[in-house]
Image (tube, rainbow, N blue to C red):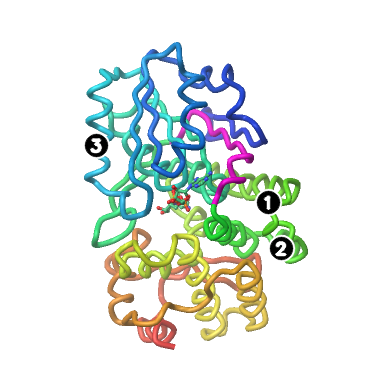
Amino acid sequence: MELGQRRYPIHIGRGLLDAPESLAALVTGRHALVVTDSNVAPHYLARVQQALAGKTTGTLVLPAGEQEKTLARFGEVMAALAALGASRDATVVALGGGVVGDLAGFAAACWMRGVRLVQLPTTLLAMVDSSVGGKTAVDLVQGKNLVGAFHQPAAVLADVATLDTLPARELRAGLAEVVKYGAIADEAFFGWLEDHAEALLARDPDALAHAIFTSCAHKAGIVARDETEQGERMLLNFGHTFGHAVETEQGYGGLLHGEAVAVGMVLAARLSADLGRAPWSDTARLAALLERFGLPVALPAGLSGESLLGRMKLDKKGVSGRIRLILWAGLGQAEIVTDVPEDDILAILEG
Ligand code: NAD
Ligand code: GLY
């Protein structure tokens, strides 16, 4: 990942967590706090602790799940860093999915105004999206990721072998973010995903490696050009304004993030077609691929369109109270649109 003069490595491969020397080398100071969750710890924590045996390490195992990405849990990470006596050269090691990565990343951004962060992603979603690019955050009941900071990791180490233990539903949720890159920027990759859907669902190592590598290349390219989301980076939020509203409205205990993004991408594509900006046939292709991945493509029952619209107004991309959406002109051609009438959005939400 290159950001002007700054750069950091993104290592992708099988068995990376089994190389203690390279793991230890990522922690440059004396102190390291490993933050993980209750599902990941039994599988992978011992290996990381062993690799860091020569350091002064602390461990914080949080309960798993989106509902834990809170200011209260953030406070627990701060307390653990204090208990460790972590100084400015400390490293926070985030071992887990996007929830752990975002939360521990935000803690690293804030502890003593910013310490080193190493991302060890263990979900497909975290490998292809959340561990790369430096967005960190926690959720509020009022809205998702509303409190956070840009804080780039010093390194990302994605051990693809950790996906062997990932539940199937979580793998499918990660595939939603993979599809996103094809949808917004790369029609050829979208076609490749159509051709390799079964291989990906069967966790074929070569197919997974290609999907992860291609996704990271897209993400790194976009972030390199627009680190703090002044323009192009907003395209990575295709489907997210709708999806975040659903997650918030469900109290972070309904659809998984990737599932909500899948629904959101289809709604954004439908809205684009309704507005005459994109062909309907591409919406159908997008929905068909997501369905092959076992992902939802319509809003869950029981959600109010008006309430979802209200949630969308608190989206971080909004300007002066106006909703800014990522729509598309068709596969591979996402665009930022600010002037969509609320009635048209509501029609999609109630459709
Ligand atoms: P998650 O972190 O909740 O992980 C999903 C589930 O899988 C959890 O129950 C976890 O305990 C379990 N798990 C993780 N790795 C495992 C493994 N190898 N084996 C067995 N179980 C495992 O969810 P996620 O989908 O990884 O991340 C979603 C979060 O990421 C959301 O909060 C979203 O907002 C955030 N996100 C952030 C960015 C960013 O740029 N920072 C981008 C996309 C998403
Ligand atoms: N996941 C959106 C971004 O990193 O910008």
In this orientation, which residue lies closer to the viewer: 175 or 109? 175
Residue at (59, 58) in percent of width and height: 175
Left or right: 277, with 191 as reference point: left
| Residue position marked by numbered label 2 in the rendering | 197
Q: Position of residue 286 (x, y in %)?
A: 63, 73
In this orientation, which residue lies closer to the viewer: 126 or 343? 126
Mark 3 and mark 1 lie on one chain; the one further toward the N terminus is 3
Q: Is label 3 in a helix, a strand or a loop?
A: helix
In this orientation, which residue lies closer to the viewer: 342 or 244? 244
> In which quadrant of the rendered view does residue 193 lie?
bottom right
- How would you rate the neighbour count of disc 3 (Cα within 10 Å): few for under 14, some for 14-19, many for 20 or more? some
- Which portion, as a residue range, is magenta? 152-166
Residue at (38, 22) in percent of width and height: 32
Q: Is label 1 in a helix, a strand or a loop?
A: helix
Eye-nearest disc, 3 or 1: 3
In the rendered image of this protein, does residue 92 appear above or below residue 203? above
Q: Which mark is residue 287?
A: none
| Residue position marked by numbered label 3 in the rendering | 76
> Please, what is the three-letter code of the amino acid marked with disc 1?
Ala
Cα distance between the residues tagged 2 and 1: 11 Å
> Please, what is the three-letter code of the amino acid marked with disc 3?
Glu
> Please, what is the three-letter code of the amino acid marked with disc 2?
Ala
Mark 2 and mark 1 lie on one chain; the one further toward the N terminus is 2
| Residue position marked by numbered label 1 in the rendering | 211
